[in-house]
Amino acid sequence: MATAQAAQTAAPAPDSAAIPNVSREELLTYYREMLLIRRFEEKAGQLYGMGLIGGFCHLYIGQEAVVVGLEAAAEEGDKRVTSYRDHGHMLACGMDAKGVMAELTGRIGGYSKGKGGSMHMFSKERHFYGGHGIVAAQVPIGAGLAFADKYLDNGRVTFTYFGDGAANQGQVYETYNMAQLWSLPVVFVIENNQYAMGTSVKRSTMSRTYWERGAAYGIAGEEVDGMDVLAVKAAGQRAVEHCRAGNGPYILEVKTYRYRGHSMSDPAKYRTREEVQKMKDERDPIEHVRSILLTGNHATEDDLKAIDREIKDIVNEAAEFSKESPEPDVSELWTDIVA
Ligand SMILES: Cc1ncc(C[n+]2csc(CCOP(=O)(O)OP(=O)(O)O)c2C)c(N)n1
Ligand SMILES: [Mg+2]
């Protein structure tokens, strides 16, 4: 078990010389993927403000390096399941921005034909199993997916994402017990963004080193700086290797931070503007990679501007699609239901 640096303790300046074996292509891929999530989420926030998105909408801005780093450690066929803060996970595993945005606006071109919305999207092709609104409900589901893979002996791993708030739920520990007992190939990813709605981890939680709780079940794990995509990828690779070698589950506690409110209707009275600004200024995951690219002479400002434009186009096209796609016909009320 290794312990990496916590996101909150230090703000290490990106030092390209200290980062081994990272190619220009790899860095540009992470830059592009994180930027896509950020711009997509900003656009979703705008559409929500315009009244085009109904219901709940939980943005992932600030946490991009978590899912992008872990997807870089995944192989084709690996599965993922997460909470309601899920748009980034969908984009990172290769789901189409148009289909995700159209689902947010409740249109037929969306992944659930406009009937699910932000928290209820799935993709069998991309092995994405939701999108779950009940806190921690996805944790036993993740173990179930891993059980199926173990039964089929197919070498696949399931990434099961949940928050610091969810990590205090009883079903997480029932799942840890069974997952270790049956040696299931599941990576439990605790996205510790310091808050569960308006409640900070300090106000809600004893023993705040969440990953260490796995020790009670003999589950290995570690903490990782979730604002550093390279550190997340490296930890993800250790986790995945552990699972694929038949050693059972692994816990990754990824220290991260959300910039926006819990959802679009968050009064944000539980933390100071200064706290949020400090994270943006000192620990932004996209700026981190941007800085490595520039200081390492891997890319010029112009190269990055071209990528910015490319991403903006993808997101604008998704927004257009999400406005033009029709609402589902009334007859859709009777499809995709279990009777
Ligand atoms: C069982 C259950 N209890 C309460 C809620 C209300 N609720 C929605 S999100 C949330 C906070 C969860 O925080 P965390 O797990 O840290 O995830 P984050 O929102 O920070 O990503 C709560 C209490 C719920 N959806 N389900
Ligand atoms: Mg949280």
Image: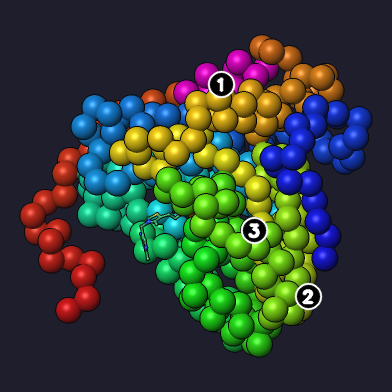
Q: Going from the N terminus, do you reach mark 1 or mark 2 first?
A: 2
Residue 271: x %, y % from top left: 49, 35
Is residue 118 in the magenta section? Answer: no
Q: Which residue is mark 2?
A: 245
Is residue 311 in the magenta section? Answer: yes
Specify the principal SS of the magenta part: helix
Label 2, label 3: how far apart the Cα atoms are? 29 Å
Q: Which residue is mark 3?
A: 208
Q: Which residue is mark 1?
A: 308
Q: Residues within 10 Å of mark 3 (few under 14, many from 20)?
A: some
Q: Quadrant of the N terminus?
A: bottom right
Callout in the foreground (2, 3): 3
Q: Quadrant of the C terminus?
A: bottom left
Q: Nearer the viewer, residue 146 or 279?
A: 279
Q: Going from the N terminus, do you reach mark 2 or mark 3 first?
A: 3
Q: Nearer the viewer, residue 62 or 207?
A: 207
Amino acid type at image mark 3: Arg
Amino acid type at image mark 1: Asp
| Circle 3 SS class | loop
Label 1, label 2: how far apart the Cα atoms are? 39 Å
The quarter of the image that holds ligand 1 is bottom left
Amino acid type at image mark 2: Ala
Residue 23: x %, y % from top left: 81, 35
Callout in the foreground (3, 1): 3
Residue 177: x %, y % from top left: 61, 83
Vertical placement of 278 versus 250: above or below? Answer: above
The quarter of the displayed image where residue 321 is located: top left
The colour scheme used to paint the residues is rainbow
Q: Is residue 139 left or right of residue 53?
A: right
**Looking at the rendered structure, which numbered label has been put on residue 132?**
none
Circles 3 and 1 in contact, beta carbons < 8 Å: no
Residue extent of the magenta highlight: 303-312
